[in-house]
Image (cartoon, rainbow, N blue to C red):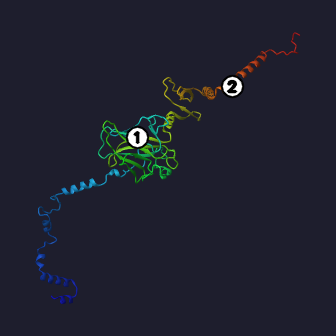
Amino acid sequence: MSDLGSAALPMSQGTFEQLWCDIGSDMGFNHLIAELPRADSDAWLTAALPNGTFTESFDDLELAEIVESAALSAEISPSSDSMPPPAAVVPSTNDYPGEYAFRLRFNQSSTAKSAISTYSTQLNKLYCQLAKTCPVEVMVEKEPPQGAVLRAMAIYKKPEHVSEVVLRCPHHQNIAENNEGVAHRSHLIRVEGSQRAQYLEDSRTKRQSVAVPYESPQLGSEGTTVLLNYMCNSSCMGGMNRRPILTIMTLETHDGQVLGRRCFEVRVCACPGRDRKTEEENLGKNTVKTASGTKRKSSFVDLKSTTLNAESSSSKKIKMDSSGEEEIFILHVRGKDRYNMLKKINDSLELMDAMTAAEKDKYKQKCASKSMNKHEQDLMQPIPGKRLLLRDDKTDTD
C-alpha cells in the first residue's frame, strides 16, 4: 500500500495491524518474529540457563555468589559499637565481674595537697582536679571477644537525682579553655590519648557516654590503662551543683552486651588530697538519735583495748601527737549525769589547750587569789555553836 493510501485510512487498532503487516512483508521481519519464543514459555529461561532447568523451588541454582555478597556487605557495614546501645532509664550500679573477672585498679597515691588525683579504697571514691589525667587500669582474667569496648558513663548517686542526665555546666561548655576543636562540649567524661574514642548519646534517655575499643595488655603488664578526664567541678552551678556522682565502667561486646561492670564515686575538686583525707576521717561519723529524741554525733573507730558495746552517746578526747595530727578516742558512758560531768571536764581541757601560756598563768594567779581570800574568810567565820566576840563585848563570866 502506498504512503498516500496509508495516510488516508482512519487511525484505529485495525489500521495499526494492517500497517504493521504491510511493513513486515516489505522488510522481511515476519519470519524473524515467528521464530521468537512466546512470553508464557520456558524457552527464555532455557536460553538464559543453558546448563540448568527452571524449577519453582530454585534448589538447582547456585547461591554461592549471593552468600559472598551478603558477607561482604556485612564487613563493609558500620560496626555496632559506633552506635549507642539501648540504655536503661536507671543504669545499674552493682559491680558485676562476669566470666572475664572484670575489675579496675587505681594508682596508689597519697593525700598530699599537690596530688592532682587520688583514690580512696575505704570510700571507693576517686578525687581529681578539673581536666586532669586520671589513670584507670582495666584488668581481666581472659581475653574478651573480638571488638569488645570499654564504656564510661556518669550518673547521679542520690535517688532524687538519678533520673537527671549528668552534663557540664554552661560556663565550662562555652569557654574556650579545654574546648578547642571539640564537638562534644557537654560530655563530662573524656578519654585522653585515644583517637578511637567515640562520644555517644542515647536517643531515648539522653545519657552521654564515651566508648573506646578494648586493647589487650602489653607484654609484662597485667592490664590496660585508660586515661579519664572530668571536665567540670562537682561544685559548679548549673552542672553537678554539689550533687555526688558515680562513674560506671562497663566491658561490652560490639553489639552492646555487658560482659562486666564496675562502679565508683567521683569528686572533682581543687584539692583532691585534702578532701580525701577529710572524708576518710569522717568515715565513721554519723548522726544517731538518743531515747529523748535529741541528736548527738558519735565517731566509731576500731579500738582493740575496749570491749564495751553498750548503747550510749560518746564524748571525744583530742590528743595532739608529735606529727601534729589529732587523735580521737571514744569513751562509752552509762547515764546522762555521768556524761554531762565528763563533758564538762573535756570542755575544760579543750579550753585549756586553746589558751596561751600567758593566759594560763593569769588564770592560775586569779584562781590562787580566789582560794586565798576564801581561806581567810573561812578563818574569820566562828565555830558552829560559838559566837564571835568583838572588842567591846563582854563574856558571860563578866
Res. 80 in view: yes
Q: Give, as a three-letter code, the residue at label 1.
A: Pro
Q: Quadrant of the N terminus?
A: bottom left
Q: Which mark is residue 276?
A: none
Q: Secondary structure at mark 2?
A: helix
Q: Earlier in the sequence, mark 1 or mark 2?
A: 1
Q: Give, as a three-letter code, the residue at label 2.
A: Lys
Q: Which residue in the structure is indicated by mark 2? A: 362
Res. 163 in view: no
Q: Quadrant of the C terminus?
A: top right
Contact between marks 1 and 2 (CB within 8 A): the answer is no
Determine the residue positioned at 52% across, 48% down: 237
Q: Position of residue 142 (x, y in %)?
A: 30, 39
Vertical placement of residue 280 versus 388, above or below: below
Q: Position of residue 294 (x, y in %)?
A: 59, 35
In this rendered view, identify the residue nearer to me: 1 or 278.
Answer: 278
Q: Position of residue 209 (x, y in %)?
A: 40, 48
Q: Which mark is residue 135?
A: 1
Vertical placement of residue 215 versus 318, above or below: below
**Label 2 packing within 10 angstroms: few (<14), some (14-19), many (20+):** few
Q: Position of residue 293 (x, y in %)?
A: 58, 35
Determine the residue positioned at 50% across, 51% down: 171
Q: Marks 1/2: CA distance?
A: 57 Å
Answer left or right for 212 relative to 114. left
In this rendered view, identify the residue nearer to me: 51 or 370.
Answer: 370
